[in-house]
Image: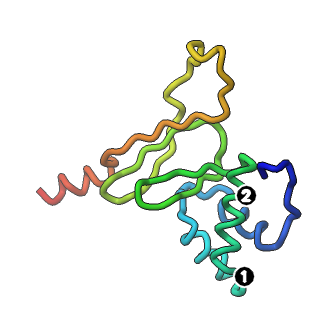
């Protein structure tokens, strides 16, 4: 957290992490809530959302704004994102900027390139319709 305090582990937070670990779909807070609610029926959306924000503050989770909603990425290693404007899927790809020499007097905390376009699956579907 920003104040330097760490929150204790809870079953709710553990279940959120379990759902996110290895999840490449970049789910929204509501998607995460729906999935975790199946395991913990008493969990509230506020609990899920607050835990997500804390994990973002602790740099354990990336927050991605797709222009409509916030989505979350458990992979905090340097990588970039491609958002398909047709199917709304987000794809990971290796970092595009590898040389930060021009920022030698800056401290880089995170790096995200976010590209919008049409994914290969949607392009393929368009060709099939024509």
Sequence-wise, the earlier of marks 2 and 1 is 1
Measured along the vertical axis of the image, is residue 12 above or below residue 57?
below
Residue that appears at 66% across and 39% down: 77
- The answer to which of 68 and 84 lies nearer the viewer is 68
Label 1: which residue?
A: 40
- Quarter location, residue 66: bottom left
Residue that appears at 32% across and 45% down: 117
Q: Secondary structure at mark 2?
A: helix
Residue 64 locus on image (x, y percent): 53, 51
Residue that appears at 18% across and 57% down: 128
The residue furthest left is 130
2 or 1: mark nearer the eye: 2
On the rendered structure, is 40 left or right of 34?
right
- Quarter location, residue 109: top right
Measured along the vertical axis of the image, is residue 44 above or below residue 4?
below
Q: Dot 1 surroundings within 10 Å: few (below 14), some, or many (20 or more)?
A: some
Per the rendering, the mark at residue 54 is 2
């Amino acid at each position: 957290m920003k104040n330097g305090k760490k929150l204790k582990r809870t079953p709710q937070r553990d279940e959120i992490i379990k759902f996110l670990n290895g999840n490449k779909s970049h789910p929204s807070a509501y998607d995460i809530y729906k999935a975790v609610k199946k395991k913990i029926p008493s969990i509230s959306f506020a609990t899920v959302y607050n835990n997500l924000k804390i994990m973002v503050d602790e740099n354990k989770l990336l927050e991605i704004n797709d222009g409509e909603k916030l989505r979350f990425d458990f992979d905090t290693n340097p990588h970039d994102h491609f958002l398909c404007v047709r199917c709304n899927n987000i794809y990971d790809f290796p970092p595009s900027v590898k040389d930060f020499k021009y920022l030698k007097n800056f401290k880089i905390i995170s790096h995200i390139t976010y590209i919008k376009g049409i994914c290969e699956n949607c392009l393929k579907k368009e060709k099939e319709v024509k």
